Amino acid sequence: MQILVVTYKLDFTTIITQNGVGLANAKIETGWGFVKGTGSTSFVTKAVTFTSTFTDPPLVFITKLGDIVGSDPTSISDLASASGNYAASDSITTTGFNAGCFSRNAANITATTRSGFSWIAIGN
């Protein structure tokens, strides 16, 4: 399983703020990945590790990309839309977070389903 991570370094001090405070040397990391269903739960998670450590836990935004049944996705275009399903981030630290995908109607995510997500982290 591959997770693509891209890191951007910004030198703005007041354009990006967190809690009203400018972020000197703000950093943005982005990526996408997927979690494999278990067949016995409507919520599946995966640990995501940043390529470099943030000074403080960053802001993390995550969205559901879609699903694929059978093989692991090798690109975002492999993922079909998944109406009624969504993603969330949890346990955000300076080194990573947990990405979770789940079914809004509480149906179990089958063991052959891979649920894709993309994310962006912004911080110092």
Image (spheres, rainbow, N blue to C red):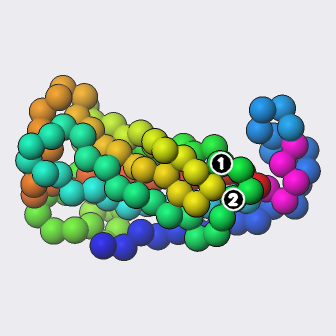
> Which type of secondary structure does the marked residue at label 2 adopt?
loop
Quarter of the view holding residue 29? bottom right
78 w.r.t. 17: above or below: below
Name the residue located 45 percent from the left edge and 60 percent from the top edge: 48
Instruction: Magenta stretch: give its range.
Output: 22-26
109 w.r.t. 124: above or below: above
Quarter of the view holding residue 35? bottom left
Q: Where does label 2 land, which residue?
A: 54
Residue 73 on image: x %, y %? 26, 67
The answer to the question of whether label 1 and label 2 lie on touching residues, with beta carbons closer than 8 A, is yes
Q: Quadrant of the C terminus?
A: bottom right
Spatial separation of the CA atoms under disc 1 and disc 2: 7 Å
Amino acid type at image mark 1: Pro
Q: Where does label 1 land, which residue?
A: 58
Residue 111 on image: x %, y %? 10, 54
Residue positioned most to the right: 13
